[in-house]
Image (spheres, rainbow, N blue to C red):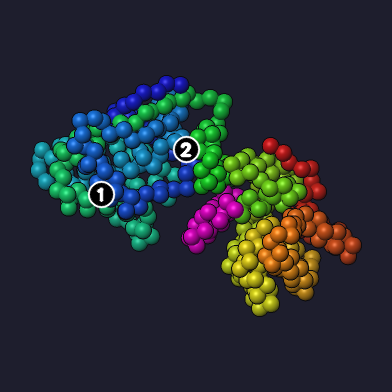
């Protein structure tokens, strides 16, 4: 491992390929961030000192560098260079020569982008790089919005290409390069970002995809659903509640969510394939949204869920996911589910009305009682025969630990 503080121009010039490790949830810079960043660069450029912009950590393997941490920072600067080349384009012979030099030294390797993002973002970045037409959906992507913001700021601030390149050349990073080792890039990334909520979910997404690409696509649909509804933070809460049920009601530490998930998934792979495991998780993720949104056709159920949500009964969510699974699979009927909801709400209201009473109930443990009801009614064998595993039936497998 070696580290040094160097200019970004040196990083981009020396690198043949800069490959995204793929752990981030996508490029999160938007047009507002881009405008602020551009203005800060102009302001800092008046100082005699370099513009220090943080740390970049990469893993080296032969001629390739995998970006473990710092992908967004590198991507932003590459987009700024794209905007710079666009401004230079067709202005004069001298500027065209400068544009081609910048383009080939810092952005291309053998005619292809040096920076290699993942999936759809690579397609969008490549179109921006080569000035290709983007479709309507691609125009809404943050990569394109940031690029357009840079073009607009260069124009309105009347910054020449030469001046802008000098400013970019002042940007420095502490670059840490580690040789490929037995420690996976995912584990390195986790160690660096363990206390950042969104990265735990990113690690889980990458973990599923690495095991099975089809399972990864199924999981990504759920991630996109949550994100498109503005519930990206709720996705982690769902995973914590899901794993709490899986671990006999023991609440999972949010900082080790990825490790707990990985342990759970590995345990379940002894009994089911990755696709089936992921489909089950995604099914419960949809139950979770239904609870949060009180999205039920049955008016009485909807009213009881609304009462639950209005009274901050979120500690009952893990148990309700289990109950909803049994309701959908026909293991309990609606009247029983309504009785469960009324019982929970009765307790929650009592808890609010008697704050000094120290009323407590382990909602997660109630799933065990529900299973006892199913067993006493002769439902258990039918559940296994149909291949319908509820959350707590999975708990009958050996408890997983990290």
Above or below, 377 relative to 2: below
Residue furthest bottom as drawn: 299
Rendering coords of residue 26 (x, y %):
44, 48
Q: Is residue 226 part of the magenta span, yes or no?
A: yes
Residue furthest front as drawn: 356
For residue 190, what is the image quadrant?
top right
**Could you tell me which residue is drawn at 77 percent across and 43 percent down?**
399
Rendering coords of residue 124 (x, y %):
36, 50
* Residue 1 shows in this picture: yes
Foreground tag (1 vs 2): 1
Taking 187 as reference, is 5 left or right?
Answer: left
Q: Nearer the viewer, residue 254 or 83?
A: 254
Rendering coords of residue 316 (x, y %):
69, 60
Which portion, as a residue range, is magenta? Answer: 215-237
Q: Main secondary structure of the magenta part?
A: helix
Q: Secondary structure at mark 2?
A: loop
Above or below, 179 relative to 353: above
* Residue 390 shows in this picture: no
The mark total stands at 2
* Circle nearer the N terminus (1, 2): 2
**Could you tell me which residue is drawn at 32 percent across and 29 percent down?**
11
Q: Which mark is residue 53?
A: none
**Could you tell me which residue is drawn at 73 percent across and 41 percent down?**
400
For residue 327, what is the image quadrant?
bottom right
Taking 152 as reference, is 218 left or right?
Answer: right
Q: Which residue carries the number 2 mark?
A: 21
Q: Which residue carries the number 1 mark?
A: 150
Question: Are there few (<14), some (14-19), or many (20+) residues within 10 Å of tag 2?
Answer: many
Q: Is residue 119 part of the magenta span, yes or no?
A: no
């Amino acid at each position: 491992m070696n580290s040094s503080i160097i200019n970004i121009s040196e990083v981009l010039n020396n690198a043949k390929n800069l490959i995204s490790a793929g752990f981030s949830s996508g490029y999160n810079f938007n047009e507002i961030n881009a405008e602020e960043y551009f203005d800060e660069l102009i302001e800092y450029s008046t100082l005699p000192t370099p513009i220090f912009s943080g740390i970049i950590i990469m893993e080296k393997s032969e001629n390739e560098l995998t970006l473990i941490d710092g992908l967004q920072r590198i991507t932003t600067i590459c987009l700024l260079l794209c905007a710079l080349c666009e401004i230079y384009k067709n202005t004069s012979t001298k500027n065209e020569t400068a544009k081609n030099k910048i383009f080939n030294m810092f952005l291309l390797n053998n005619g292809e982008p040096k920076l290699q993002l993942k999936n759809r973002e690579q397609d969008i970045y490549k179109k921006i790089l080569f000035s290709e037409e983007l479709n309507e959906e691609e125009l809404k992507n943050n990569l394109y919005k940031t690029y357009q913001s840079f073009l607009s700021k260069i124009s309105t601030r009347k910054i020449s290409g030469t001046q802008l390149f000098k400013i970019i050349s002042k940007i420095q990073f502490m670059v840490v390069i580690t040789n490929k080792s037995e420690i996976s890039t995912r584990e390195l990334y986790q160690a660096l970002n363990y206390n950042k909520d969104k990265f735990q979910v990113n690690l889980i997404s990458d973990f599923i995809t690495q095991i099975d690409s089809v399972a990864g696509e199924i999981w990504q649909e759920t991630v996109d659903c949550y994100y498109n509804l503005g519930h990206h933070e709720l996705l982690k809460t769902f995973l914590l509640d899901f794993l709490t049920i899986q671990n006999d009601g023991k609440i999972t530490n949010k900082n080790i969510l990825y490790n707990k998930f990985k342990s759970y998934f590995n345990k379940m792979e002894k009994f089911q394939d990755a696709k089936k495991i992921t489909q089950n998780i995604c099914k419960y993720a949809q139950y979770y949204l239904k609870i949060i949104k009180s999205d039920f056709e049955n008016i009485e159920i909807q009213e009881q869920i609304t009462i639950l949500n209005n009274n901050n009964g979120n500690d009952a969510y893990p148990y309700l996911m289990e109950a909803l699974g049994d309701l959908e699979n026909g293991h309990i009927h609606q009247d029983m589910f309504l009785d469960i909801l009324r019982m929970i709400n009765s307790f929650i209201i009592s808890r609010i009305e008697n704050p000094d009473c120290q009323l407590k109930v382990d909602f997660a443990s109630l799933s065990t009682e529900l299973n006892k009801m199913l067993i006493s009614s002769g439902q258990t064998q039918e559940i296994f025969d149909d291949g319908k595993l509820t959350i707590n039936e999975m708990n009958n497998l050996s408890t997983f630990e990290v």
